Amino acid sequence: MAITFQEQIKKQRNFILVFVILILVIILVLWQGFRTEEQPSEILISKRLQKIEINLEIFQNPLLQQMQLIDKTPAFEGILGRENPFIPF
């Protein structure tokens, strides 16, 4: 079954339409991604100047007081690795 000249033109027209729509969608997504909404400078300054307060009373919690420190891990005793690590076990 041979493809006629009209069918080829119709396919090409459809491919061009899909390609143009794809390009427009990509441009729209990129434009939305790079567009930034500017915030008033007063808001930015007030965000930077907020005082940070750290609540150190959390360390007085009885659960934290009951915890014990872990001793250091003992040094490894034995042979490290194998002569040829690429051979199967």
Image: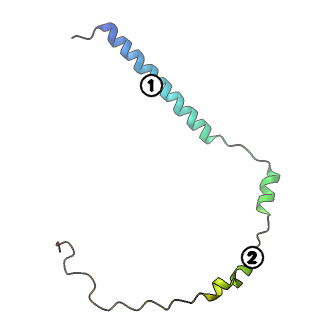
What residue is shown at x 79% (from left), y 64% (from top)? Answer: 50
In the image, residue 81 lies at what x, y percent?
A: 26, 81
Label tally: 2
Instruction: Pick whichever, 80 or 67, lies toward us.
Output: 67
Instruction: Pick whichever, 43 or 54, lies toward us.
Output: 54
Q: Determine whether the residue tagged by mark 2 lies in a helix, strand or loop.
A: loop
The answer for how far apart the CA atoms under marks 1 and 2 are is 58 Å
| Residue 66 relative to residue 25: left or right | right
* Neighbours of disc 1 within 10 Å: few (<14), some (14-19), many (20+): few
Instruction: Pick whichever, 67 or 34, lies toward us.
Output: 67
Precedes in sequence: disc 1 or disc 2? 1
The tag on residue 55 is 2
Q: Quadrant of residue 73?
A: bottom left
Quadrant into which the N terminus falls: top left
Indicate whether 69 appears above or below 54: below
In the image, residue 16 lies at what x, y percent?
A: 43, 20
What residue is shown at x 56% (from left), y 36% (from top)? Answer: 29
- What residue type is disc 2 on? Asn
Q: Quadrant of residue 13?
A: top left
Front of the two marks 1 and 2: 2
Residue extending furthest toward the right:
42
Indicate whether 32 appears above or below 63: above
